């Protein structure tokens, strides 16, 4: 799976894959350039990435972990009420600061919903460091919506912070968003459409 981002205004491809401990080891090395450490959201991006890493490792020991779509489907076929951990990562060799540009750490509930527990984009991107990369966070949301559609999940929900609420509202066309959000039906269809049109995604 892949989508496009803009790098200094020019489109560049980003691969989306199910992540593992290998990708998280790279995420653990994320650092924010000193010039942007005070930019709003940069500190959150590092904190959320570290929390996502800890959560994924905890789930690795306690519930099933999907490493691709086929395994996800296989787990659900064996147990329709299975809780499943999954990590989506956006990666690209052209980004010199890290091969990993962003991540979405999620859990499939026994009700067949996806909880987006942590969404994080590399702090240099969040802080607007050169090169300016745009579209990683939205691309991950659109990719997650595409995954949900492919495995028959009707709802993605999660917590929004004061900083992230406007992002989710705009990206997913959500109204009256407070400290939580629900992406379903029309919003989910919108995100899947944006995956193909705005982000030029390929599943």
Image: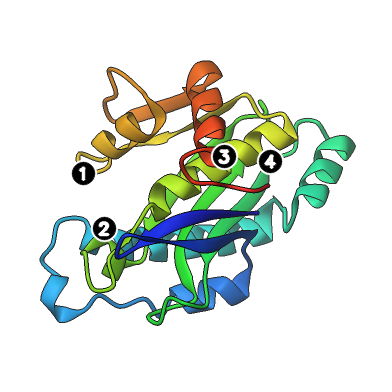
Residue 77 or 98: which is nearer the viewer?
98
User: Which is nearer the N-term, disc 1 or disc 4?
Assistant: 4
Residue 16 or 26: which is nearer the viewer?
16
C-alpha span from label 1 to label 4:
29 Å
Alpha-carbon neighbours of circle 1 within 10 Å: few (<14), some, or many (≥20)? few
Left or right: 81, with 50 as reference point = right
**Which label lies toward us, 1 or 3?**
3
Q: Quadrant of residue 60?
A: bottom right
Q: Decide if residue 85 is in sight here.
A: yes
Write down the residue under mark 3: 196
Write down the residue under mark 4: 83
C-alpha span from label 2 to label 4:
27 Å
| Secondary element at image label 2 | helix
Write down the residue under mark 2: 44
Task: Look at 26% across and 26% down and name the residue there.
Answer: 178
User: Which is nearer the N-term, disc 3 or disc 4?
Assistant: 4
Left or right: 41, with 58 as reference point = left
C-alpha span from label 3 to label 4:
29 Å
C-alpha span from label 3 to label 2:
29 Å
Task: Look at 63% across and 60% down and name the residue there.
Answer: 17
Q: Position of residue 75 (x, y in %)?
A: 82, 44
Marks 1 & 2, CB-CB < 8 Å contact = yes
Marks 3 & 2, CB-CB < 8 Å contact = no
Alpha-carbon neighbours of circle 3 within 10 Å: few (<14), some, or many (≥20)? some
C-alpha span from label 1 to label 3:
27 Å
Write down the residue under mark 1: 163
Left or right: 11, with 192 as reference point = left
């Amino acid at each position: 799976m892949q989508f496009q981002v803009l790098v200094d205004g020019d489109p560049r491809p980003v691969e989306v894959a199910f992540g593992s401990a290998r990708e998280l080891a790279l995420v653990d090395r994320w650092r924010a350039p000193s010039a942007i450490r005070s930019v709003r959201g940069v500190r959150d991006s590092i904190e959320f990435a570290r929390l996502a890493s800890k959560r994924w490792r905890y789930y690795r020991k306690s519930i099933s972990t999907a490493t691709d779509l086929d395994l996800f489907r296989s787990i659900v076929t064996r147990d329709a009420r299975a809780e499943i951990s999954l990590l989506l990562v956006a990666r690209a060799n052209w980004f010199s600061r890290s091969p990993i540009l962003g991540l979405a750490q999620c859990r499939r509930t026994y009700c067949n919903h996806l909880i987006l527990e942590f969404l994080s984009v590399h702090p240099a991107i969040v802080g607007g460091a050169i090169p300016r990369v745009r579209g990683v966070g939205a691309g991950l949301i659109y990719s997650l919506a595409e995954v949900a559609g492919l495995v028959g999940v009707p709802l993605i929900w999660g917590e929004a912070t004061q900083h992230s609420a406007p992002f989710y509202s705009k990206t997913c066309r959500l109204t009256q968003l407070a400290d939580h959000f629900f992406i379903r039906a029309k919003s989910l269809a919108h995100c899947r459409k944006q995956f193909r049109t705005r982000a030029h995604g390929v599943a």
